[in-house]
């Protein structure tokens, strides 16, 4: 098997691992939305068994643990594969960083089960899940032929640069996910999350508008902006619908199906929005370079000097 085929194989495996992580996020969101986080009191076993009675909330918690174990194995296999085929040392390190993140995520899950303190431990568990997911998404991009191939590097002469805007957008989306997780796990009310949504909306619209105005003809940037706008637009609709579902089911004895579907969808699309923003940030980092400060002044000075040269002046007076 040639080197190209090996790299193509690890790229597909990275995509598969990231896709399985989406299922893990779904399973985790189902645990919270169904109030099943305290349905299993022990860890790593469940009621002292490898396979507990699959009734009530135990079904959601146990399914979450099984999928987490599968994702952990896939992540370890990905790191080993990268170690064998990757020449880029930072990529090998990133693969093992993903392993460290999934181990830390498992330990945080154990703390949530054994020690409680949901507002802190569950929020931290949810935040680390987002970091782990975007790490795998980044690995999938870094192992692609597009990332490793030759691309034309473009100058971004505007201010602020698209690189800066994309990075800040990713940052505010991450903060918004923290606020959402904290609200979902009872750390505080919804007002900070609503304010955060407004800030994210401004950054997403601003970044997309600037990127399209300057680099609309660059397919990779154009597709990344479309993906970011699509996920964020969907997220806004789901956020409103999920909050309506919360208010509607406030007095219900247990979460209804509508609330579960909308709240889980809101969590997952939030993760996809974060991934889309990260991809846009990385694509811009790959393609764009900031024009050196003072470059325009230097060019103008060179032009003036050329026009002031004796030969140029003589030609102009003939």
Image (cartoon, grey):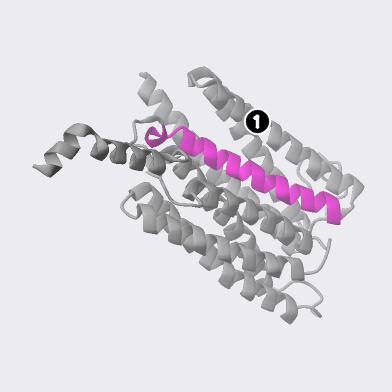
Q: Residue at x 64, y 41 (%)?
A: 132
Q: Is residue 201 shown in magenta?
A: no
Residue toward you, 158 or 307: 307
Residue 61, position in %: x, y?
75, 52
Horizontal side of 289 relative to 178 (left or right) equals left
Question: Compared with residue 316, is residue 269 higher up or lower down, i.e. above or below?
Answer: below
Residue 73, position in %: x, y?
63, 32
Residue toward you, 266 or 256: 266
Q: Magenta segment, principal secondary structure? A: helix
Horizontal side of 96 relative to 317 (left or right) equals right
- Residue 103 lies in quadrant: top right
Residue 239, position in %: x, y?
63, 70
Residue 220, position in %: x, y?
38, 47
What residue is pinned by disc 1? 97
- Residue reaching furthest to the left: 318
Q: Quadrant of the C terminus?
A: top left
Question: Compared with residue 297, is residue 269 higher up or lower down, i.e. above or below?
Answer: below
Q: Quadrant of the N terminus?
A: top left
Q: Residue at x 65, y 44 (%)?
A: 131
What's drawn in magenta, residue-wise?
118-147
Q: Residue at x 80, y 42 (%)?
A: 108
Question: Compared with residue 85, is residue 106 higher up or lower down, i.e. above or below?
Answer: below
The answer to whether one can see residue 231 in this image is no
Q: Residue at x 57, y 60 (%)?
A: 269
Residue toward you, 224 or 33: 224
């Amino acid at each position: 098997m040639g080197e190209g085929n090996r790299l193509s194989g690890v790229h597909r495996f990275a995509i598969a691992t990231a896709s399985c992580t989406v299922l893990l996020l779904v399973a985790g969101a189902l645990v919270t939305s169904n109030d099943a986080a305290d349905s299993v009191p022990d860890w790593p076993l469940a009621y002292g068994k490898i396979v507990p009675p699959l009734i009530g909330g135990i079904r959601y918690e146990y399914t979450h643990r099984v999928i987490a174990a599968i994702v952990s194995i896939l992540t370890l296999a990905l790191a080993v594969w990268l170690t064998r085929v990757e020449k880029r040392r930072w990529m090998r390190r990133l693969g093992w960083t993903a392993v460290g993140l999934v181990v830390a995520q498992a330990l945080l899950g154990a703390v949530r089960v054994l020690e409680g303190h949901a507002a802190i431990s569950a929020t931290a568990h949810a935040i680390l899940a987002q970091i782990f997911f975007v790490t795998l998404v980044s690995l999938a991009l870094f192992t692609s032929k597009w990332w490793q191939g030759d691309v034309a590097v473009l100058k971004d002469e505007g201010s602020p640069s698209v690189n800066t805007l994309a990075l800040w957008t990713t940052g505010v989306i991450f903060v918004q996910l923290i606020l959402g997780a904290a609200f979902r796990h009872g750390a505080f009310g919804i007002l900070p999350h609503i304010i955060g949504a407004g800030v994210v909306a401004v950054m997403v619209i601003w970044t997309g508008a600037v990127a399209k105005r300057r680099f609309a003809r660059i397919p990779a940037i154009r597709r990344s902006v479309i993906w970011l706008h699509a996920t964020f637009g969907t997220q806004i609709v789901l956020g409103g619908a999920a909050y309506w579902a919360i208010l509607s089911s406030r007095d219900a004895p247990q979460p209804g199906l509508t609330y579960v579907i909308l709240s889980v969808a809101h969590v997952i699309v939030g993760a996809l929005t974060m991934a889309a923003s990260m991809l846009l940030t990385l694509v811009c980092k790959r393609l764009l370079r900031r024009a050196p400060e003072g470059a325009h002044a230097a060019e103008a000075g060179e032009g003036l000097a050329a026009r002031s040269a004796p030969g140029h002046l003589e030609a102009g007076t003939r």
